[in-house]
Image: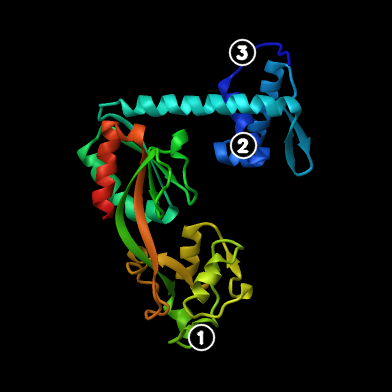
């Protein structure tokens, strides 16, 4: 394979790499936080720089050309190497000035983090905080975040994790909605209600049925991946949803749908990469989060 030039813009290479991994320009745009046309222009410009065709546009996305298949592995290796350099460099910082990024779910970012972040800013005004509010797990190896708040224990040996809390989640609904159901007192009664789901899989339904409910796919007429949208729907009386008790018990517009039903365990872990964890400001924020969340 002969390229017209070996010089290229890394941002364009990153756009190509993410597009190849995501399978479409639209998905790559969401992952990169840019517009779909921007991704397309960056990939086209990279192809012009290298003098090769890397992607073919097909009906439902994109496909790598033979050259693209070869090139993407080189770019992936470069991306991983750059991430390792970034991790090592971040870990060597002893300054209490700079940015620390925190990844957490929408609910934790909205309801639990604000007072902790406020306290960090008061005690360490030189530390700036980036909050990545997402229900997807950030890739700490690629520096998508410095610290992640997760509900599962990571298995990656490169990550440092501390369990800070064992919380619980319950089923909540508005008093008016429970009144419409006749004030359910048993799993059978509650099974007549409508539930707000996270996705179209059966995971939530199977978990609730294991607690004694008798739900089917028709029991979930509303689906949204957004925890905040779910919660607002619940508060407005649109159905029953699952929520952490720290949030649910503090909200006067809802109540536990069936207090005698066993709660869902919600472990809370703080996670960081070993290299990044060596940074003084990351350690400060990590410890402050551990104290605040626990």
Front-lying residue, 22 or 251: 22
Q: Position of residue 109 (x, y in %)?
A: 39, 51
Q: Residue at x 73, y 24 (%)?
A: 67
Residue in the image at 28% along x and 29% along y = 97
Circle 2 packing at 10 Å, graded few (<14), some (14-19), many (20+), is some
**Mark 2 in CB contact with mark 1 (< 8 angstroms):** no
Instruction: Say how the picture is coloured.
Output: rainbow
Nearer to us of marks 2 and 3 is: 3
**Circle 3 sits on which residue?**
7
Which numbered marker is on residue 188? 1
The CA distance from mark 2 to mark 1 is: 48 Å
Q: Earlier in the sequence, mark 1 or mark 3?
A: 3
Most extreme residue toward the left, as rendered?
Answer: 123
Q: Residue at x 50, y 49 (%)?
A: 136
Tag 1, which secondary structure?
Answer: helix
Q: Can you identify the residue that label 2 sits on? A: 35
């Amino acid at each position: 394979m002969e390229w017209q030039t070996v010089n290229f813009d890394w941002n364009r290479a990153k756009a190509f790499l993410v597009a190849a991994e995501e399978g479409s320009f639209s998905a790559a745009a969401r992952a990169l936080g840019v517009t779909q046309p921007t991704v397309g222009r960056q990939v086209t410009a990279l192809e012009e720089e290298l003098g090769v065709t890397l992607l073919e546009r097909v009906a439902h996305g994109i496909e790598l050309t033979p050259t693209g298949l070869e090139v993407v592995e080189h770019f992936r290796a470069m991306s991983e190497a750059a991430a390792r350099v970034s991790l090592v460099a971040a870990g060597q910082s002893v300054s209490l000035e700079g940015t620390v990024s925190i990844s957490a779910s929408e609910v934790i970012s909205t309801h639990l983090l604000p007072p902790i972040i406020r306290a960090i800013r008061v005690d360490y005004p030189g530390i700036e905080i980036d909050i990545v509010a997402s229900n997807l797990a950030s890739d700490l190896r690629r520096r998508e975040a410095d610290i992640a708040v997760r509900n599962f224990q990571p298995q990656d040996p490169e990550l440092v994790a501390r369990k800070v809390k064992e919380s619980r989640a319950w089923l909540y609904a508005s008093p008016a909605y429970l009144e419409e159901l006749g004030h359910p007192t048993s799993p059978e009664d509650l099974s007549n209600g409508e539930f707000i789901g996270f996705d179209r899989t059966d995971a939530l339904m199977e978990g609730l049925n294991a607690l004694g409910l008798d739900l089917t796919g028709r029991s979930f007429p509303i689906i949204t991946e957004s925890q905040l949208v779910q919660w607002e729907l619940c508060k407005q009386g649109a159905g029953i949803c699952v929520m952490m008790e720290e949030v649910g018990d503090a909200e006067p517009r809802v109540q536990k749908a069936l207090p005698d039903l066993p709660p869902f365990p919600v472990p809370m872990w703080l996670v960081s990469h070993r290299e990044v964890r060596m940074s003084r400001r990351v350690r400060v924020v990590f410890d402050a989060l551990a104290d605040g969340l626990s």
